[in-house]
Amino acid sequence: MMFRSTRGIAPAVPVDAALLAGLAPDGGLYLPAGIPVAHAPFVPGQALAATATQWLAPFFEVSALRDALPAICATAFAFDAPLRALRGDGDYLHELFHGPTAAFKDYAARFLAEALARLRPVGAPVNTILVATSGDTGAAVAAAFHRRPGFAVAILYPDGRVSQRQAQGLECWGDNVRAFRVDGDFDDCQRLVKHALGDADLRAAVSLGAANSISLGRLLPQLAFHAHAAHEHQAARGSLLNLVVPTGNLGNASAAWLARRMGAPIGDIVLATNANDTLPRFFAGGAYAPRPGLATLANAMDVGAPSNFERLRSWHDDDAALRAAFRAEAVDDAGIRATIAGAPARHGIVPCPHTATGLHLLERLRAEGDRRDWVVAATAHPAKFDSVVEPLVGHAVALPPALAVMLARPASGQPLARDYPALRAQLLRA
Ligand SMILES: *Cc1c(COP(=O)(O)O)cnc(C)c1O
């Protein structure tokens, strides 16, 4: 399996080159040149890591990582993603938040770290992974690369725009991880990272890498947990699993789409966004019109220009075909609050603000009379957003053990001006 660029100018490359490059040299995003059909038999009760190995193997047939794939998946998918039945008949929650930083991004970040560590040439200089984050990606990448020989991490996050516990998750690592609080918003952070990655003089002096959501290594692994849940569900209920995916940069939903195309028993896919409604406007028939991101309660989805849109567009013949593949709806902060407040009685759980956008759409589907089985992807643990969630449900949310470990570590970040020379000087100091 080769990987091509969405822009079609850069030559197709094997998976290892696509993982190492991040972005294609023509500025496009890498995606598989064809979509393989998964033939592996699913045995109910098999480990998530086994499903990941089966479903990712077709992409790694021509790869230095081929024989290591089971070991990579064993580490990346070492924690379960249980499918929990909610109170309503046919309502499910897919808990993707049992990793070290309590968000689904742990799976792909750990996969990428395991893959890059094995692809790194012996004796190569320390590779600094640059990551702009709106809250969860930075922590997942930091945890995955922390104390990993040959790698360092520089996180850029928007000062004052993440929850206190998210900030702790970004600043608590130390050793080979540095966290910069940028005096600006997420778009400023992303712009600074792109500037550094495009600075040839800097890159001659410092070895830089990227781990943002455009990286193929952040996208592909995610198809495993969707395929696994859909198979478990089909074995138990004999029907397709329909998905509601809380969506920002469209990485998780693109992976679900890919799993469906490869043959996973997935039915409809509904995208839940927050008030950043670029995707709902497109899927309702409007033009694709990216906007600056708005700050909302579901901050990891504060994206006005979803980066994986370019991949989805490239996978479809035209916009009409793409529009037929998904439904997308926005949920504003008032809807998020009402859903969190009502969730304990209605669903028997406490959701994080991102998961609440998905539950809100599930409630809408039920109100429309939809009787099919639906699962909402629970993308982060509610305890990470205690300051939003606890006042709404009226009680404290217990900390999962991994989050308690993270919160007990000492934290230190450094302020960074939102101009490029300041970042450049820091990177040269590494
Ligand atoms: C990143 C994130 C999302 C959005 O996922 P995308 O792949 O960017 O669409 C949703 N919820 C949480 C908690 C996240 O961290």
Image (cartoon, grey):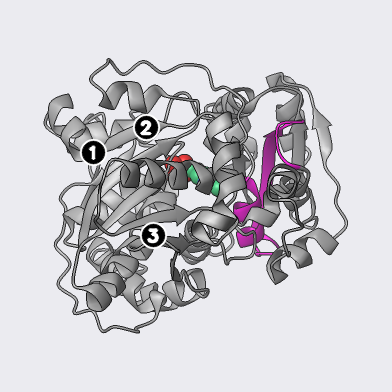
Could you classify mark 2 by the number of other residues whose Cα lies within 10 Å: few (under 14), some (14-19), or many (20 or more)? many
Label 3 or label 2, whichever comes before in sequence order: 3
Q: Measuring from the top left, give residue 220's x and y in whole percent.
A: 35, 55
| Residue that appears at 24% across and 77% down | 235
Does 225 appear above or below 329?
below
* Res 323 → quadrant: top left
The stretch in magenta equals 136-163
Across and down, in percent, residue 395 comes to 76, 56
SS for dot 1: loop
Amino acid identity at mark 2: Glu
How far, Cα to Cα, is label 1 from label 2?
36 Å
Give x and y (percent) for residue 357: 48, 41
Q: Nearer the viewer, residue 76 or 248?
A: 248
Amino acid type, mark 3: Pro
Q: Which residue is denoted by mark 2 in the rendering?
A: 329
Quarter in which the C terminus is drawn: top right
Residue 325: in magenta span: no
Q: Nearer the viewer, residue 253 or 88?
A: 88
Q: Which mark is residue 221?
A: 3
Residue depicted at x 39% and y 81%? 47
The quarter in which the N terminus is drawn is bottom left
Residue 126 visible in the picture: no
Q: CA distance from mark 3 to mark 2?
A: 25 Å
Q: In this rendering, is residue 420 above or below 164?
A: above
